[in-house]
Image (cartoon, rainbow, N blue to C red):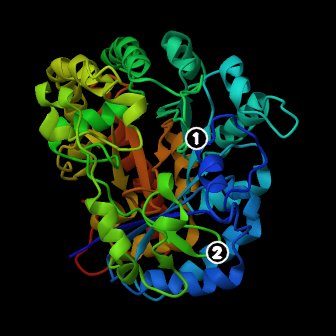
Amino acid sequence: MKKTVNLLIKPASALCNLRCKYCFYANISSIREVRSYGKMKQALVDEMIPNIYADLNDGDELSIAFQGGEPTLAGLSYFEHFIDVINQQTKQVTVHYAIQTNGTIISKLWVPLLRDNHFLVGLSIDGGPLYHNLNRVDTHQRGTFWRVLQTKELFDEAGIDYNVLCVLTNELAKHPQKVYKFFQEQNVPFVQFIPCLDDLDATSKSDFALTPERFASFYQQLFPLWLNELKGGHYRSIKLFDDVLNLFLHGQVNACGLTGQCQIQYVIEADGSVYPCDFYALDEYRLGYIQESTLRELFSQPIAFDWLKNKQPLPTYCDTCPFKKMCCGGCKRMKDAMYVAPSNRFCGYRTVLETVLPRAEEIMQVMAICRERERQLFSVLGLRPPLAALDTAYYCDIDLMQWVKERYGIAFAKYLAKHTTPTQILVQLAQREHLMLLKTSPFGSDTWSVRVSLANLATAQYATVGQRIIALFDQDYASWHHQGGGPDGDHKIR
């Protein structure tokens, strides 16, 4: 049975070139024996990756996210070496890469690595210069907004997949309209608002830490803005809305802690030490060292079982909640930011659910339109539409190489793979057929997959999209056939 393994690697430990005022990992690292383990050595990478692969089989998937501190401080050569070692492994494992960055170090030199290896980048932008520069400052206490915006523009130009990570402070949560307008103006398609937390060892509430009341107020005001845009034909992913709808409509859990059950995350520090959760990368929770043990062996440690079993009692307010069985108290680290308030009379997450779920049917009607658009596109291409799932309701992914094999034959597919690239195909579609498609994100698809938005064209136009894709490949197939190529076996153009 195919399995997916998720890793979170900190190649530069807690090292960072910024001094963000709310950084939770700066706090975590300050209350353990060793604050920073420095930069991960290449020799450790050489030992680590075989141990990761020891418990993987052909057909499995491996998602590797790099985080910090600031992971790009490990240097471009670190990531190049890491990927080289991954590529040397003999098991047929699909690997997906992601990286979370403050965006101040990345330059054009990083583009080939991120683009060619299909990294999904989490870029930290706190919703406009005023809010961003309030907390995200460098070592000289200078704001970093404009440097990060340059990186965003670089990603846009280079076609690098990214989403924006916005830390939801108590102050920022007062201004949902301004924040949403900023992301609209910047054409940011994917936004994740991360609740700002107090220090783990805090004795009093800080000014920037989010409260359940402010959390609820922010999303209550944000939701109609998001829904109106969706009904107008434009989808912008707000991760919490996606997660909630996935959970309650499809039973899909896409966020750790959303159902109150902790999971082992395999957080790997720069010295190889492994922890069950990024929020608790502390000495007392160390599972062992990845250069000495396999993932299965680390998971079998008593500390891991204690971690999974360690549940805090729910507030009495939860007894009155209709969502108790689906929530079970949520993430224990987030409890003071988004769940039951100290008064035991209010829950931020419950309020959000009561705001979003009554409109679920309306949202599903909009998605039904998207499904019809997908049906028309796939029908023209001769493909069977995938099973409905909310996480792909507003776009669809097409494996072009598999489609080419089925429509034109294996010989032509091999010719394409040898003489062109997915990026060149997308450029040709734009130049010759006036059709703009996107490369897919690294999660769920291979390198020859393209993504078609289902939210931005009239329904009847999606058949035309399919026809234009066919027109391009028909021309290339005819040219190849004229030059001496031909169908192999029974594979002939349909």
Q: Residue at x 49, y 14 (%)?
A: 176
The residue under label 2 is which amino acid type? Asp
The circle on residue 431 is 1
Could you say which quadrant of the image residue 341 lies in? top left
Near-viewer residue (451 or 72): 72
Pinpoint residue 100: horizontal percent, then vertical percent: 59, 50
Q: Residue at x 69, y 34 (%)?
A: 21
Instruction: Kindly tell me whether residue 385 is visible in this rendering.
Output: yes
Which image quarter holds the C terminus? bottom left
The circle on residue 271 is 2
Question: Tag 1, which secondary structure?
Answer: helix
The residue under label 1 is which amino acid type? Gln
Instruction: Kindly tell me whether residue 267 is visible in this rendering.
Output: no
Question: Tag 2, which secondary structure?
Answer: loop
Looking at the rendered image, the disc whose residue lies closer to the viewer, 2 or 1, is 2
In the image, is 494 to the left or to the right of 195?
Answer: left
Could you say which quadrant of the image residue 218 lies in? top left
Number of on-image labels = 2
The circle on residue 30 is none
Pinpoint residue 197: horizontal percent, then vertical percent: 51, 35
Q: Residue at x 44, y 23 (%)?
A: 211
First-in-chain label (2 vs 1): 2
Judge whether 446 appears above or below 231 on screen: below
Pinpoint residue 378: horizontal percent, then vertical percent: 24, 45
Which image quarter holds the N terminus? bottom left
Near-viewer residue (335 or 112): 335
Q: Mark 2: few, some, or many residues within 10 Å (few <14, many ≥20)?
A: many
- From this viewpoint, which residue is outermost toward the front? 203
Q: CA distance from mark 2 to mark 1?
A: 49 Å
Near-viewer residue (219 or 261): 261
